[in-house]
Image (cartoon, rainbow, N blue to C red):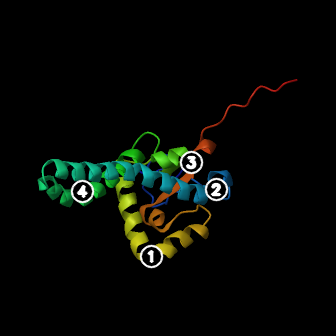
Amino acid sequence: MSDSGNSGIWRNDGAVQPHAYDPYLHPELFRGVATRRVFAFLIDMIVISVPVILGYLFIALFGVVTLGLGWALFWLAWPASVIWAIVYYGACIGGPSSATIGMRVMDLELRTWYGAPGYFVLGATHAVLFWVTVSFLSPFVVLVGLFNGRRRLLHDFVLGTVVINNSVRAPVPQAARPY
């Protein structure tokens, strides 16, 4: 059974659902997103790096206490760092705010192209695909975001995600007017 109206229910007639966030109808959703995304990334790198550095320091001190035997744990530090970063992005984007800590500080959130919030696998895949594309296509990944209305980067296109301003979606109550 198919529905050809715009009632928002499932369709079987082959029609493609439009993007939930149109940069021409709602430019405020994308205003300043590219710049704030850079700062959100830097904040997230600090959040990810602190436990990794503490882990390395713990292994170094543990090696001193065990007369060098504990230093054998250094081979676990790099894989643990990668797993920690993937879990961080997956848990944050899969959480109720659909944003990492850096994105929350910068008032951004990640959504699918059709408007659904993020989920764990999407967040983890987003992080992995970002690092893979940046490793091979560094300038191209950033340049793509400068030439589209939604400020999507290369990995956003591949995954079907969009990063929007969070404060625009949540209506802010107006202050009382002094008369």
**Which of the pair 13/51 is nearer the observer?**
51
Expressed as whole percent of the image width and height from the top left, the position of residue 8 reads 51, 46
The C terminus sits in image quarter: top right
User: Of callouts 4 and 1, which one flags the residue occurring earlier in the amino acid sequence?
Assistant: 4
Which residue is identified by label 1? 137
Q: Give the Cα distance between marks 2 and 1.
A: 23 Å
Q: In which quarter of the image is residue 137?
A: bottom left
Q: Which mark is in front, 2 or 3?
A: 3
Report the residue at 25% width, 48% height from top. Answer: 58
Q: Give the Cα distance between marks 3 and 1.
A: 25 Å
Which residue is identified by label 3? 106
Which residue is identified by label 2? 32
Report the residue at 52% width, 53% height from top. Answer: 40
Q: Which amino acid lies under the numbered mark 2 shown in the image of this protein?
A: Gly
Expressed as whole percent of the image width and height from the top left, the position of residue 155 reads 44, 65
User: Of callouts 2 and 1, which one flags the residue occurring earlier in the amino acid sequence?
Assistant: 2
Q: Do the residues labelled 4 and 3 touch (CB within 8 Å)?
A: no
User: Of callouts 3 and 1, which one flags the residue occurring earlier in the amino acid sequence?
Assistant: 3
Q: Which amino acid lies under the numbered mark 1 shown in the image of this protein?
A: Leu
